[in-house]
Image (cartoon, rainbow, N blue to C red):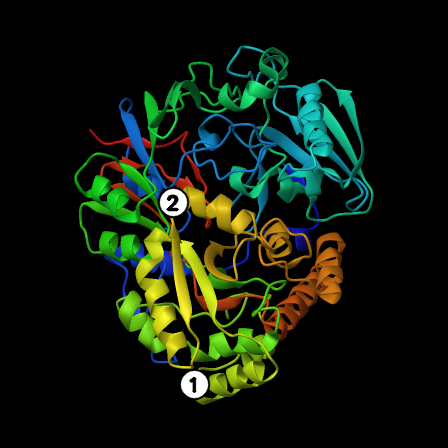
Amino acid sequence: MIRIPRRYRRALVTFVTVIGLAALVASCGAVQAQGNASGVQTLRAVSPYGGDRAAEGEPQRGGTLRVGMDRDAVSFDPVVPNANQAASVVYDSLLRLTPDGRTEPFVAKSMESPDNGLTWLMGLRPGVKFQDGTDLDANAVVLNVQRHIDTVASPAHRFAERISSMRVVDPLTVEFVLGQPMGEFPTVFALSYSAGTLGMIVSPAALQKYGDAIGTHPVGVGPFTLVEWVRDSRITFTRNQNYWQDGLPYLDGIEFRPLPDTETRFASMKNGDVDFIYGGYYQELSRALGDPNLKVYYGPGSGGERLQFNHVRAPFDDRRMREAIIRAIDLKALSASQYGNQMIPADSLFDASSQYHTQAASDAWPAYDLEKAKQLVEAYRADGGNPDFTFKTSNSRTSFAEFVQAQMAAIGVKVDIQLYDLAQFSSAVMQSGDFQLTTYLGSIDTPYPAVANLLRSGGSGNYGKYSNPEVDQLLDDAMLTTDEAQRTKDYQQVELLSARDLAVGWYSRNYSSNITRAAVNGVYRYMTAGTWFEAVWIKQ
């Protein structure tokens, strides 16, 4: 087991009393709307971390699960940045996050620090083999981590570069010595593929064989083996007959299909073309919640939907314009027009129930005030600025873009809308930073590294190039400290300072969900919708 001080074990933020809510919702079989102080109706969580294994019954073997993902994969190489929703079937994780706030062994059997976070010893399970028949051993772990160290563009490079040295103690033990003590170090072996992780290991023999082409020939220790990848059509997997967990997986195979259009993806679920989808928006979630033939896995969490300002491009390099936009958006009207009066409004980085939230951050957030918004725009215009801008977003957010356009017209700002399909939007807009204002979403499984990704200078998710040296220092301190109380204070200060700066424009919590047919069971997921499939089964 992982032996780390108790104060480190709260790796997951406890969101909106989500566990209790999930139990309540699951017991009544539906998600209920509830009111809040603002008068906006909200949704509650339902099975946010997966299904109730005991209630689902005895697993059945066989069948192929058809999964609708919101975009095609770019690569299966863990050092290549991309949101690959199929990667978890090939690569099991060395460690995993659990709903009750722990980082626990999975493929690895232990993770221990003998000196309060400076040195870490990882123990591996004996007998675990890659899908090519070679052994998962300490050398394989070192080789894979070294690839992240050597590849600056890797989404996990920022974790790997914390390591000063690695050593193979014996075939099943790796020693990591860090540059500084880091209580959060086990977490970086438990993150989802899309977040960047050191925990998904590629076969060294496959790396030797395929070299840079490993991204299309993945070989891991996961429950399924790649059979065929037809770009923009399907990715097909078959059961790994030598999987390290006896009796698993239950399925014969899995087929992933890229379905980037929201309406098409949900329609494919409704008509039975697919069994499982990744839902990103309220539209899918709300429809699925009312359908007795579908199951929903959802938790709102911290973070959520946000306006993304470009801090290095006019007009949002000026705080007055960021504040004007926030003050001009009527959340009640937004909820009524876009969210069926069930929006979960957000005015802070962390949800109010989180230990990392401070009321001061919510108090600092600009309230809806049309007259104040108009004054800010006029002051900006009087100083020679042009408040008009282009709003870029994905074509699944057309109605939201039109809502923003109408709200801005009310304060004298002209907005042009440019729409992109999801894959193009991710690369051409977000990753390139080619926007003035856009929208993005993402919940938070753990404060580290999600908050640093979003708010630290150069963070992988800091698409708007927000920068505050004080915030950077606080984020570094929160990562390194061995004092959980201090870590909590650091994140509270980060939340407050970023609220005062209006780093991003929060407006709603998250609606990312997984939706399945009623016959699908055994789902295990992170709040951010990263999903594991080894125990999934289909009731015949």
Answer whether residue 204 is visible to the viewer in this image: yes
Query: What is the CA distance from the residue labelled 2 to the residue labelled 1?
Result: 42 Å
Q: Position of residue 496 (x, y in %)?
A: 63, 73
Up the image or down, 57 lies above or below 171; here it is: below
> Which quadrant of the figure has residue 363?
bottom right
User: Mark 2 against mark 1, which lies toward the viewer?
Assistant: 1
Whole-percent x and y of residue 136? 61, 19
User: Given the image, on which type of amino acid does mark 2 rest?
Assistant: Gly
Looking at this view, name the residue that lies furthest to the front.
Answer: 384
Image location (x, y in percent) of residue 129: 55, 16
Left or right, residue 502 beside residue 269: right
Q: Which residue is mark 2?
A: 50
Q: Secondary structure at mark 2?
A: loop
Residue at numbered disc 1: 370
Question: What amino acid type should be assigned to the residue bearing mark 1?
Answer: Leu
Q: Which quadrant, please, contains the C terminus? A: top left
The correct choice, above or below, for 226 with respect to 72 in the image is: above
Quadrant of the rendered structure where residue 300 is? bottom left
Residue 382, how many percent across, how many down? Answer: 58, 85
| Relative height, residue 57 to residue 131 (above, below) | below
Q: What residue is rendered at 36% in x and 56% in y?
A: 22
Label 2 neighbour load within 10 Å: few <14, some 14-19, many 20+: many
Q: Nearer the viewer, residue 495 or 407?
A: 407
Q: Earlier in the sequence, mark 2 or mark 1?
A: 2
Q: Is residue 529 visible?
A: no
Q: Residue at x 35, y 57 (%)?
A: 397
Looking at the image, which residue is at 47% across and 19% down?
243
- Residue in the foreground of this view, choosing between 536 and 149: 149
Residue 206 shown left or right of residue 113 in the figure: left
